[in-house]
Image (cartoon, grey):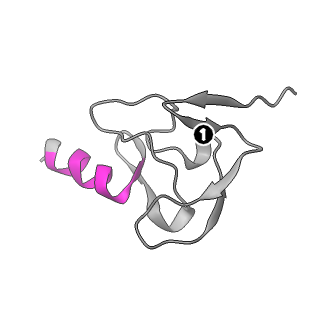
Amino acid sequence: MTVTRATIFGKEVGDLVTAQCEHDGCTATIRRGLHAACGHSHIRGDDKCNGYFCEEHIKMTKVGRRCLACAEIVKANNE
């Protein structure tokens, strides 16, 4: 298996890249792999912010993993 690192939208990303959760006030150390990416993607979208979060600050929605703020947008758009 090849593990890659890349810089996307000014952030170094990849499974080996350690960083801090991007939720305000959270100091948890995370790895910037797809599992921590809002939207399970390194690319921005209408309902994902391109942020990386710890398990406490990311949740599963009807359209995939989103940070808490984007999960609220998904919820509002689907009501």
Indicate the quadrant containing the N terminus: top left, top right, bottom left or bottom right. Answer: top right
Where residue 54 appears, as percent x and y from the top left, is 56, 61
Residue extending farthest to the left is 79
**Image: 69 above or below 5:** below
Which stretch is magenta? 66-76
> Is residue 44 toward the left or the right of residue 79 in the image?
right
Residue at the image point whose x is 40% and y is 67% from the top: 24
Q: Which of 10 and 45 is in front in this view?
A: 10
**Image: 18 above or below 49:** below
Q: Name the residue under label 1.
A: 34
Is residue 9 within the magenta segment? no
Residue at the image point whose x is 30% and y is 56% from the top: 69
Where residue 8 appears, as percent x and y from the top left, is 55, 29
**Image: 21 above or below 50:** below
Q: Nearer the viewer, residue 40 or 20?
A: 20
> Is residue 46 toward the left or the right of residue 12 in the image?
left
Where residue 71 appears, as percent x and y from the top left, is 31, 52
What residue type is disc 1 on? Leu
Where residue 31 appears, as percent x and y from the top left, is 68, 51
Q: Nearer the viewer, residue 23 or 76?
A: 23
